[in-house]
Amino acid sequence: MMEVRVYSAEELQRVGIENEADVITRPVISYWKGAILRFKKNHIAMFAFGLFVLFLFFTLFGPALSGENYTEIDAANRNIGPNGSFWFGTDQLGRDLFSRIWIGARLSVIVALVCSGIQIVFGSIYGGIMAYFGGKVDAVMMRIIEVVNSFPSLLVTLLIMMVVGKNVIGLLIAMSITSWVGTARIVRGQIMLLRESEYVKASQLLGGGAARIIKKHLLPNTISLLILDLCSSIPDYIFTEASLSFLGMGLGGDIISLGVLISDGKTKMQFYPWQMIFPAVVLVVAVLAFNLIGDGLRDALDPKTVN
Amino acid sequence: MNLLKYILKKIAIALATLFVIASATFFLLALTPGDALSARVEKLPDEVTQRLYAKYGLDRPVMERYFITMKGILHGDFGESIIYEGETVQQIISEKGPVSARLGIQQMLLGVTLGILLGILAAVKKGSFWDFLVIFFSVLLISVPTLIFALMLQAVFAGKLGWFPVIGWPSKGDWLGGFKYTVLPTLAGCFGYIASYARLLKVSMLDVMNQDYILTAESKGLSRREVIVHHVLRNSFIPIITRLPMSVAMCITGSFFIESVFSIPGLGLYYVNAVAAQDVTIVMGETVILSAIYIFVIFITDILYTVVDPRIRISGGNA
């Protein structure tokens, strides 16, 4: 019979590293540190990040910076072109467009963020439940996803806006009611894929507990996908809000958003083009920044691009 | 599992979805405060009001109306518009449908063709200035919403330069004479396709170029041109083909904004107006028909995935 003997740590000796070339010289960095390093090296992404910071700065402090009136009707200053005091000109009621644009951008971004938040949280929970339970539960929940996925989302959004009325809460409900489906699919697919993947099995064999597997494998791999999902959905929501408001089906009345401003500006396009061009440009720059940051993150978060 | 069973299952899901959409639309409309007639009957005597409501069945309880409506839809009868007297949903679809279809077809033909050409250029000249240019412009184009494109094109080429009409659409059957009306709406809608197809094809081609069979083809001594035309292109079209039906669906949505900017008398503009006016029968009918097109398109996409790429195995609908 073979004798089984347990060696103590002192008796064991590491072999195989005889020459310098085999020594691991690259510093071991965590996944997230590596991702940040890769992102910082990407000039286009950093430029977009700069744009984003600038955009954020103006949405927060823009109205205060200009210091001009943007709420009261001012008959003396109607439809003024861009000048020293009104940087983006004024609208048909004499209100400072610069301030109005940043107030509007504030709302557009908040709406996009809240909708994306709802989408990510609900989608993750739904997808997580599907992956966790599997079997019948998964099958039924998948059918629901297929049904919701076949809804033409714009039609649904229009109908819901009609029922709940043209207010911010209604818009949030209408825009996020069908959008969680994609996130749920991503989360479910990723968790199922990871559970079956060889490195998770290897980790289990090596004695890694559930906590370690979730922390080291499930979370980083799923969170990176969710971040990318977030980056692509924010511009979508900004678009949708603007488009709905343009059709007269989104926000309106006293509420200002980029969509409302573009819609207002359109009516004056022939005579005072800046009233539409400025909000449109701000919207495009914001969306461009989000898209470029998303592209940069996609490269940075992919561990296969290590070099 | 065989293909037939898979298709039957998909059809069942599609029908169930359509039923859910029709029901949801009906109850959403029923929940909406006010109705299409309230503005019209304000100054009318009570008796006339009652008769009007009775004419459109709006005086009956919600559930009864629901069954009447669903029965009508099953028989292909969507009812008569409340706002435009005498017009039925079928008439409106047959009148407005071709307008939207022409716009969509022109957009897709131009957009997809240009997108494919640019995608090939970017992939073949990878890392070059052209590659950078294509990718840069596709990111830029993706970041500009269709709505903004439409407004800008209208402002510059119709408003400032006056090269094209600001709004309008050629009358029925006028294919060549009214072409100038279609130029700007077509351009506004095609940029999205150019950007997405260029990116899609580039990624797909680079992926195929890394495959072993391309190495084999190159080592047989084929020229680069032959490798690209015969081996790379053929295999990288799978994502393009499976994407096409979804683009048709996107076209339906995109048409809402473009039709509204250029006042094109198509289904999108009509739908938006019907929703605003609470024209229940029209909204119901158009929702069901547009949804049916949309669901059909998704169905085709699913089938295409399994037919085009034999590597995709049909497994109990798990995706």
Image (tube, coloured by chain):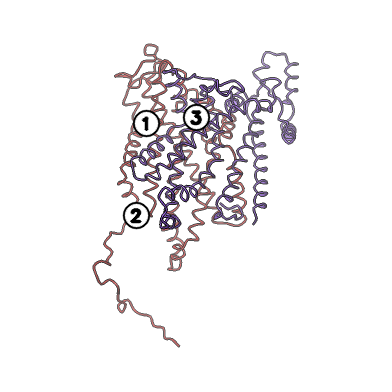
Chain colours: A red, B purple
Task: Residue at 31% x, 57% y: name it.
Answer: A29
Q: Which residue is mark 1?
A: A59
Q: CA distance from mark 3 to mark 1?
A: 20 Å
Secondary structure at numbered mark 1: helix
Residue A163: x, y in percent? 60, 30
Q: CA distance from mark 1 to mark 2?
A: 36 Å
Label 3 crowding class (10 Å Cα cut-off): few <14, some 14-19, many 20+?
Answer: many
Which of disc 2 and disc 1 is earlier in sequence? Answer: 1
Q: Would residue B6 be seen by someone viewing this image from the given angle?
A: yes
Depth order, front residue of B311/A18: B311
The vertical placement of B282 against A32, above or below, is above
Q: In the rendered structure, the residue with mark 2 lies on which chain?
A: A
The vertical placement of A241 against A39, above or below, is above
Q: Which residue is mark 2?
A: A306
Which of disc 2 and disc 3 is earlier in sequence? Answer: 3
Between disc 1 and disc 2, the foreground one is 2
Between disc 3 and disc 1, the foreground one is 3
Secondary structure at numbered mark 3: helix
Which of disc 1 and disc 3 is earlier in sequence? Answer: 1
Task: Residue at 42% x, 47% y: name it.
Answer: B225
Q: Are marks 1 and 2 in contact (CB under 8 Å)?
A: no
Q: Amino acid at mark 3?
A: Ser
Relative to residue A139, is residue A273 drawn left or right?
left
Q: Which residue is mark 3?
A: A243
Q: In the rendered structure, the residue with mark 3 lies on which chain?
A: A
Q: Amino acid at mark 1?
A: Thr
